[in-house]
């Protein structure tokens, strides 16, 4: 029995050490904003507060990710329904453009950034212009 507990404890430790997710996160209710290092923390926090202040919380789980690459930020949103992405209306595209403009002004201090719609694994499928 002791061997079994020791083996289970060792196996659990190995599973935890295999965790490769190096992201940090801000969590508030159903919203999680992921980021990778401290240089992204301030923007990630601003995004979380923006989401709440602008009434963008849906009551369902929402995951966003902030990442800085080659000096430029990207904010990634997970698409609720990937199939509907090819059928976006002009009104929906305009709403995304308005969201990007408000983020540009209120969160990113008028610094350009990419707003991406992504898969559940944060793989970009659409970039808002």
Image: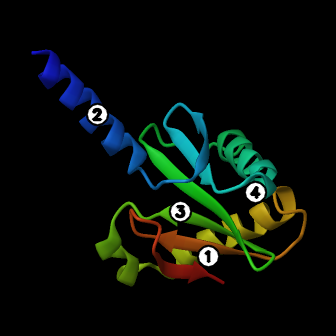
Q: Residue at x 59, y 58 (%)?
A: 65
Q: Is residue 94 above or below residue 102?
A: below
Whichever of callouts 1 and 3 sits on the residue coming sooner in the sequence is: 3
Q: Position of residue 115 (x, y in %)?
A: 64, 72
Q: Is residue 29 above or below residue 1?
A: below
Q: CA distance from mark 4 to mark 1?
A: 27 Å
Quadrant in the rendering for residue 111: bottom right
Whichever of callouts 2 and 4 sits on the residue coming sooner in the sequence is: 2
Instruction: Kindly state the secondary structure of the residue where label 1 is placed.
Output: helix
Whichever of callouts 1 and 2 sits on the residue coming sooner in the sequence is: 2
Instruction: Kindly state the secondary structure of the residue where label 3 is placed.
Output: strand
Q: From the viewer's perspective, is 119 left or right of 71?
A: left
Q: Position of residue 113 (x, y in %)?
A: 75, 74
Q: Label 1, on which residue?
A: 94
Q: Residue at x 37, y 83 (%)?
A: 86
Q: Label 3, on which residue?
A: 77
Q: Label 4, on which residue?
A: 40
Q: Label 2, on which residue?
A: 10
Whichever of callouts 3 and 4 sits on the residue coming sooner in the sequence is: 4
Q: From the viewer's perspective, is 63 left or right of 9?
A: right
Q: Closer to us: mark 3 or mark 4? A: 4
């Amino acid at each position: 029995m002791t061997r079994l507990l020791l083996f289970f404890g060792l196996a659990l430790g190995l599973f935890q050490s295999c965790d490769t997710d190096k992201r940090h996160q801000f969590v508030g209710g159903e919203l999680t904003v992921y980021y990778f290092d401290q240089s992204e923390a301030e923007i990630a926090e601003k995004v979380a507060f923006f989401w709440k202040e602008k009434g963008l919380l849906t009551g369902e789980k929402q995951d966003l990710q902030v990442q800085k690459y080659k000096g430029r930020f990207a904010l990634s949103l997970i698409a609720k329904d990937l199939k509907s992405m090819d059928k976006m209306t002009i009104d929906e595209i305009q709403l995304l453009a308005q969201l990007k403009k408000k983020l540009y002004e209120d969160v990113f201090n008028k610094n350009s950034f990419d707003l991406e719609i992504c898969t559940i694994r944060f793989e970009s499928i659409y970039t808002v212009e």
